[in-house]
Image: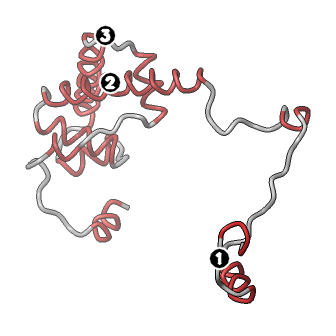
Amino acid sequence: METNHQVTLSRADIEKIASRLPHRVRRRFESDAALTDLAAEQPSLDEVVADHEREVTASRVEAALNAAMAGLDSQDRLIFELRFREGRTVAEIARALRLDQKALYRRVDRSLASLLTALQAAGIDKAQALKIFESAAVSFEWREHTKGTLPPGPSPEKGEREWS
């Protein structure tokens, strides 16, 4: 260091500085045969393309579903939220909303059929929609569609006890 770089520090000072530097691990070289069994760090091009296609389809499904839900009346949107977001049975919903259970089954079926028709009109077939819904790539904002339809209720803990 003194000869090549004209450093005027003593050897003890240089060793003290060197001890504070992080320890570096030497490079290790592997043969090509050892590298063939290692997994790639990046996804394959096919996976990237498939992910992109799923995202595009998911955004189309989400937009179509949001538009279709906006076309339903507020009570139908509330029924859908209770049925599909909250996981309540039609019988529970009928009791909670004081509706005829048989009529509610028919109403849910009609609403589902109208949603399916709206998705098909947007160019989304049933298989695509089911594939997207199973992958959880679509986020649906229930509160946007049911705003003002839910009466003020109990706390989530008390509500869970009442539904049980």
* Residue assigned mark 3: 123
Inter-mark Cα distance, 3 to 2:
9 Å
Give the camera-side residue of 70 and 100.
Answer: 70
Q: Which one is closest to the eye, mark 2 or mark 1?
A: 1
In the picture, which quadrant includes the N terminus? bottom right
Residue 114 position by quadrant:
top left
Disc 3 residue type? Answer: Gly
Instruction: Judge the density around disc 2: few (<14), some (14-19), many (≥20) Cα neighbours within 10 Å.
Output: many
Q: Residue 23, how many percent across, how many down?
A: 73, 71
Considering only order in the chain, which callout, 1 or 2, is on the residue closer to the N terminus?
1
Q: Residue 155, how many percent across, how many down?
A: 24, 69
Considering only order in the chain, which callout, 1 or 3, is on the residue closer to the N terminus?
1
* Residue assigned mark 1: 7
Decide: is 2 above or below 76.
below
Inter-mark Cα distance, 2 to 1:
68 Å
* Residue assigned mark 2: 61
Inter-mark Cα distance, 3 to 1:
74 Å
